[in-house]
């Protein structure tokens, strides 16, 4: 479990990251973020998730999941990066994703919604 106190930063949040390895040896990561009410990101990610649901097709969903499964365990790629690459960038394969990501680097919070 990793904890980051970002209450006094622009993110105004607490982050919790839990990593667990299952009986097959697969690594699962659960990210939990508590955001200060009234801060810049209050409700923002809920709006992003709603918008993704609106534009998500079965093909896009399969592609996003395929990319997540293809990623190395220690890649540290945000889930929203996969969504953006597929929805906005038209990415359909791991090599395309790597090339797209090199052209669209992210530092900090990814402020994007479809």
Image (tube, rainbow, N blue to C red):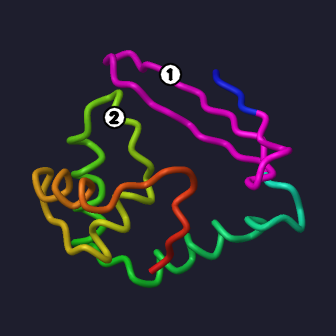
Q: Is residue 27 left or right of residue 61?
A: right
Nearer to us in this view, 43 or 26:
43
Q: Quadrant of the N terminus?
A: top right
SS at circle 1? strand
Q: Is residue 12 left or right of residue 19?
A: right
Q: Is residue 63 left or right of residue 16?
A: left
User: Residue drawn 50% across and 33% down?
Assistant: 29
Q: Point out the stretch of residues depicted in magenta.
A: 5-34
In front of the other: 99 or 97? 99
In the displayed structure, would residue 86 be above or below residue 15?
below
Residue 48 x %, y %:
57, 73
**Which residue is depicted at the point 36% across and 55% down?**
105
Q: Position of residue 64 (x, y in %)?
A: 29, 59
Front-most of 10 and 69? Answer: 10
Residue bearing mark 2 = 75
- Find the residue positioned furthest to the bottom: 54
The reply to whether the C-beta atoms of the residues labelled 1 and 2 are less than 8 Å apart is no
Instruction: Give me the residue at 71% from left, 28% from top.
Output: 3
Q: Quadrant of residue 26?
A: top left
Q: Nearer the viewer, residue 60 or 96?
A: 96
In the displayed structure, would residue 48 be above or below residue 16? below
Q: Which residue is mark 1?
A: 20
- Few, some or many residues within 10 Å of mark 1 (<14, 14–19, 20+): few
Which badge, 1 or 2, comes first in the chain's sequence?
A: 1
Residue 113 vertical placement versus 17 (above, below): below
Secondary structure beneath dot 2 equals helix
* Residue pictured at 49% horizontal, 51% vertical: 107
Q: Is residue 7 shown in magenta?
A: yes
Query: Where, quadrant-wise, is the C terminus in this rendering?
Result: bottom left
Report the Cα–Cα distance between label 1 and label 2. Answer: 16 Å
The image quarter in which residue 43 lies: bottom right
Residue 88 at x, y = what percent?
A: 31, 77
């Amino acid at each position: 479990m990793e904890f980051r106190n970002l209450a006094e930063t622009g993110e105004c949040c607490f982050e919790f990251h839990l990593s667990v390895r299952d009986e097959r040896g697969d690594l699962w990561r659960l990210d939990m973020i508590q955001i200060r009410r009234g801060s810049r990101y209050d409700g923002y990610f809920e709006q992003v998730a709603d918008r993704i649901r609106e534009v998500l097709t079965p093909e896009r969903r399969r592609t996003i999941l395929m990319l997540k499964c293809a990623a190395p365990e220690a890649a540290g790629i945000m889930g929203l990066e996969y969504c953006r690459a597929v929805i906005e960038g038209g990415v359909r394969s791991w090599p395309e994703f790597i090339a797209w990501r090199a052209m669209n680097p992210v530092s900090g919070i990814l402020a994007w919604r479809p």
